[in-house]
Amino acid sequence: MDKTVTIYSTPVCHFCHAAKDFFAANNIAFTEHDVAADLEKREEMIEMTNQMGVPVIRIGDDVVIGFDEDKLKELLEI
């Protein structure tokens, strides 16, 4: 099962920082896209979720909107 982690975030988003801290604390590698600076990734995120809120976290084929630690633990099996 694909556990590739991607986070769409902005530099000023508190919950984005919390999510990245969570990944670091659990030794989870992730790719970050700054949707404040990267128009292409912002459009990709909006197309995927139909909204502009961050963070958007993709784990394999699953998408989590917001920082839902319990859901992340479930999807990452930690």
Image (tube, grey):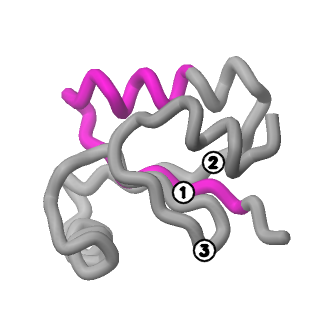
Q: Position of residue 27 (x, y in %)?
A: 78, 29
Please, is residue 40 above or below residue 34 in the view? below
Find disc 2 in the rendering and name its residue: 30
Q: Secondary structure at mark 3?
A: loop
Q: Quadrant of the N terminus?
A: bottom right
Q: Residues within 10 Å of mark 1 (few under 14, many from 20)?
A: some
At 78% from the left edge and 69% from the top edge, which residue is drawn?
2
Q: Which residues are magenta?
A: 4-21
Find disc 3 in the rendering and name its residue: 61
**Drawn side of residue 30 relative to residue 55, left or right:** right
Q: Earlier in the sequence, mark 2 or mark 1?
A: 1
Find disc 1 in the rendering and name its residue: 6
Where residue 59 sits, quadrant-wise, is bottom right
Kind of residue at badge 2: Phe
Q: Secondary structure at mark 2?
A: loop
Kind of residue at badge 1: Thr
Number of marks:
3
Q: Position of residue 75 (x, y in %)?
A: 69, 51
